[in-house]
Amino acid sequence: MPRRSPFPILLSESERQQLEAIARKYTAPYFEVVRAKLVLLAADGLENQVIGERLGLPRQVVSKWRKRFYTHRLEGLSDQPRSGRPAGFSPSRGRAGEGARL
């Protein structure tokens, strides 16, 4: 038996426009596009399991982002700071011991 989410998503017109723009943006990071599509499908009344199947995500991940959008709206779709030590390298710096590239 399918579960109904306790977090119904109702979008304002401006929120829908912003999410559709993100979902269509070719150069946006993949995670932003997927999260925007997830919220749009939730607003259309689809259940978490169906959204997960369409986007290739586990139901628990869909539930997490649906709840974050429900409580924090658009700001909830961005990544929150993580605990722990920050990365110790810069991707633009290259590897240790590497000389100049030709």
Image (cartoon, helix red, strand yellow):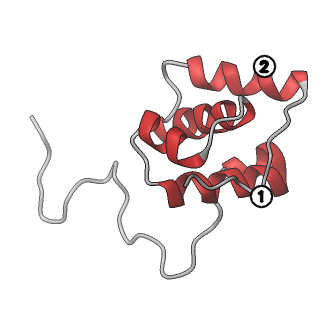
Q: Secondary structure at mark 1?
A: loop
Rendered-image quadrant of the C terminus: top left
Label 1 is placed on what type of residue? Pro
Does 78 appear above or below 87? above
The residue shown at (41%, 69%) is 87
Residue density around tag 2, few if under 14, some if 14–19, many if 20 or more, within 10 Å: few
Task: Return the mark for residue 17.
Answer: 2
Between 10 and 97, the one lying in front of the other is 10
**Which residue corresponds to the image point at 57% horizontal and 79% vertical from the top-left?**
83
Q: Residue 71, percent across and down?
A: 83, 57
Residue 54 placement (x, y as % from top left):
45, 33
Where residue 99 appears, x then y in whole percent?
11, 52
Badge 1 density bin: few <14, some 14–19, many ≥20, Cα 10 Å: few
Give the amino acid type for the residue marked by disc 2 in the picture: Gln
Report x, y in % for residue 5. 71, 54
Q: Specify the label residue 56 is tagged with.
A: none
Q: Secondary structure at mark 2?
A: helix
Above or below, 89 against 7 in this view is: below
- How many numbered marks are there? 2
Which one is nearer the viewer's eye here, 21 or 89?
21
Camera-side residue of 83 and 85:
83
The residue indicated by pointer 1 is: 6
